[in-house]
Image: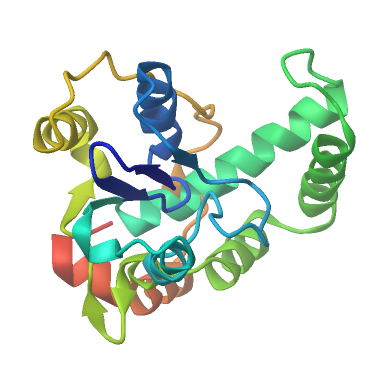
Amino acid sequence: MLISHKHKFITIDIPKTGTRSFRESLLPLGVIDIVGEPNLNADFYQHGTARQCRDSLQKLNKNFSEYFSFTIVRNPWDRYYSFFKYFKEYAEKYKNKDASIKWNAPEINQGKMCLKMFENQDKKTIMRNLIKNNKPQHEYYIINNEAVINHIAEFENLQNEFTLLCDQVDITPPALEHGNKSLNLQNMHEIYNQQLIDLVAQKEKHVIELKGYTI
């Protein structure tokens, strides 16, 4: 979640939709007043929903509807596979004590969790749990059965969507950084079976219908 009071915009950052790239590109410009925190209990959580953002803004006597609101969605089958790749890569980094990560307590705890996940379960079970345990994308941008976000962007068109956001809020678009890349560890069709495909289709029906996504 990013909020700019001067430029009057909010980004609602759905996990695994390229939001880190937006954050790394916009922060150096000095236009962001509130950066979502990784703490789940923070007023402005990094991956907070539109409802959470609206309620937290009210505490500051500010109105969500007065801001240009922006979020990114992604092909849901690709998105859950991205979760899988990220946790698999993190498990390998923890196992090898990768020097690119500062291994403080939060990173160590996540590394242990990821390593345990991949040591004790088969890939399809891991994918099933990832699908079941993560919010569907529409829950981030809907309040009371109504989409409240001004622009629902597409991950698959990230550069153009970033330019659109900057143009809309009167910011000269900087180069779009590409953060949080994960390795292409395995073809996702080797992990998805029909049951998992259908599970995603049921859970992510709203965004699939909205954007016409297919596997």
Left or right of 167, for residue 14: right
What residue is drawn where x is 30% and y is 74%? Answer: 142
Left or right placement of residue 66 versus residue 53 in this view:
left
Write the residue at 30% across / 19% down: 176
Looking at the image, residue 25 lies above or below residue 147: above
x, y (%) of residue 191? 52, 53
Residue 173 vertical position relative to residue 190 in the rendered view, above or below: above
In the rendered image, which quarter is residue 30 located in? top left
Q: Is residue 147 visible?
A: yes
The percent position of residue 119, horizontal first and vertical second, equals 84, 48
Q: Name the spot of residue 80 as percent of width and height, x first.
A: 47, 55
Say whether residue 43 is left or right of residue 163: right
Which of the two residues, 35 or 116, is positioned nearer the viewer here? 35
- Residue 80, compared with residue 162, is above or below; it is below
Q: Residue furthest front?
A: 61
Quarter occupied by residue 90:
top right
**Residue farthest to the bottom?**
144
State the count of labels. Answer: 0
Visible residue check, residue 212 = no
From the top left corner, tell me how far across and down residue 64 is, in percent.
30, 63
Q: Quadrant of the C terminus?
A: bottom left
Location of residue 197 with respect to 32 vertically, above or below: below
Residue under the image location 77 percent in, 59 percent down = 121
Q: Nearer the viewer, residue 84 or 21?
A: 21
Give the colour scheme shown.
Answer: rainbow
Residue drawn where x is 56% and y is 32% of the image: 185
Q: Nearer the viewer, residue 73 or 59?
A: 59
